[in-house]
Amino acid sequence: MMTAKSSSDPALKLTIKPKSVAISPARREAFAILLELERGHSYADDLLRGQRVTALSQQDRNLCTTLVLGVLRWQIRLDSAIHPLLARPNARLDPEIRIALRLGGFQLLFLDRIPAHAAIGESVGLAKAAGHKFASGMVNAILRKLTVVAKPSVDVPEHLSPVELAEASGHPVWLVERWVSFYGSETARAICLHGQQQPIVALRLDSVTAEDELAAEGIRVEAGALLTAARVVAAGDVTASVAFREGRVRIQEEGSQLIAELAGSGSQILDCCAAPGGKTLILAANNPTARVVASEASAARLSAMQRRLSSTANQASIRRIEFRQADAAVRQDGDAFDLVLVDVPCSGTGTLGRNPEIRHRLQPADLERHHKQQCAILRAALQSTIVGGRLVYSTCSLEPEENEAVVAEVLIEAGNWKWVSFAARIRELQTEGRLTDSGVEHLLQCVGNDGALRLLPGKLATDGFFVVLLERVS
């Protein structure tokens, strides 16, 4: 509960002079990113790795990232603190004003080392710079009122009701209620806690010298939790390294890497919905004699994937990839594959630590829309798989409508497929030296009675994923 300080608190005497305030590069970029996200464009993880952010100094990059992810993670609690202070609490504010208030409010309520005059002054300056000269006075007044509000606790105690857990962790009530229902209170709490933490930066090394190169530049990496080929950044900015810029190391979440490793081998391989291409590259590298087709419906995403992969060090693998613009929900006549990866577009609720804005965009009706699209994509992929071939269906969603329900509905229609447990494949990867010993132990515990692999945020050092292995029997 947030309580007001005494009226004699010196914070009340703050005087802000917006005209004299220069806006820092970090706050300016954070404001621009939050505005783009507010308008439903892109994802935080992508924007924070964009050119404008990487061009900042390391100190400004760190602050920009802290501001963007912090505002998004605590947006629900920020709004609940800000709106009662408005002259009309139910008024709908312009996006620029909402973001200026949230940015200032986050710094005042959740950060300890930023002076109040900097947080308020630059937020007022951002509102004015966005063309809201008159509303900037309101931003000033509201943020000054927040300086006399006690900093809220970020602790998430155990044994909370779903509503209390949602409020304490900055998540929508309807999502938390679902997770409690599906996974139990303890796991739901772990999911929420994971959504409020800074995500691990995991790497894939595409050169035997990459790790030494990073060390020479002062970037310390440690072994991945699951995969022997994965590394996690322990210290330093990998995006500033020569090895990263020249494509000998790339950022790829470890669970995402794992899905490509689990897919296994084939001679004719199809990667549906392939962008951004990290899994495609692992498939090609692991199957050096195979034909690999990377399919993507969006021309822009396909082009971006080609550019991204063309800059990596593993050019031998890239040359064998056939990039194709195609709707994954429509079978491509004449194609037949013995290995198909179907990593479908989904709600992304397993990635809320990396993309916290999803919790504010997603609505219950979206899950049914995703379900229909996912069923269509899976149907087409099944038709492209030969008898004896295998198909991996995966999402980064925690929602059954996008996971078990999709596979069950489509297989009832298809009939000539069977679920294959991932337990044997995990043992194969252990024998091949691709999994860490602890990774094998943890992953086997994540294989359900139906053979599907469920990675839940907070249980392992990965985002949340659902993965099923299917085999065509006739």
Image: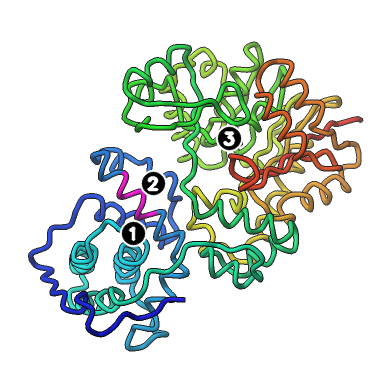
Closer to viewer: mark 1 or mark 3: 1
As helix, strand or loop, the secondary structure at mark 3 comes to loop
The image shows residue 220, relative to residue 5, as above or below, that is above
As helix, strand or loop, the secondary structure at mark 2 comes to helix
Residue corresponding to mark 3: 274
Q: Position of residue 427 (x, y in %)?
A: 78, 23
Q: Position of residue 191 (x, y in %)?
A: 61, 54
Tell me the kind of residue under disc 2. Leu
Q: Is residue 63 magenta?
A: yes
Q: In terms of depth relative to the viewer, which is nearer, 225 or 177?
A: 225
Label tally = 3
The image shows residue 33, relative to residue 215, as above or below, that is below
Q: Residues within 10 Å of mark 3 (few under 14, many from 20)?
A: many
Q: Position of residue 467 (x, y in %)?
A: 72, 40
Task: Please report the bounds of the magenta region as a residue range.
Answer: 62-68
Q: Earlier in the sequence, mark 1 or mark 2?
A: 2
Residue 449: name its quadrant.
top right
Residue corresponding to mark 1: 111
Closer to viewer: mark 2 or mark 3: 2
User: Residue at coordinates 43% horizontally, 55% vertically from top-left?
Assistant: 41
The image shows residue 244, relative to residue 466, as above or below, that is above
As helix, strand or loop, the secondary structure at mark 1 comes to loop
User: Are dots 2 and 3 in contact, CB under 8 Å?
Assistant: no
Q: In terms of depth relative to the viewer, which is nearer, 389 or 192?
A: 192
User: Are dots 1 and 3 in contact, CB under 8 Å?
Assistant: no
Identify the mark at residue 47; answer none if there is no mark: 2
User: Residue at coordinates 61% horizontally, 36% vertically from top-left?
Assistant: 255
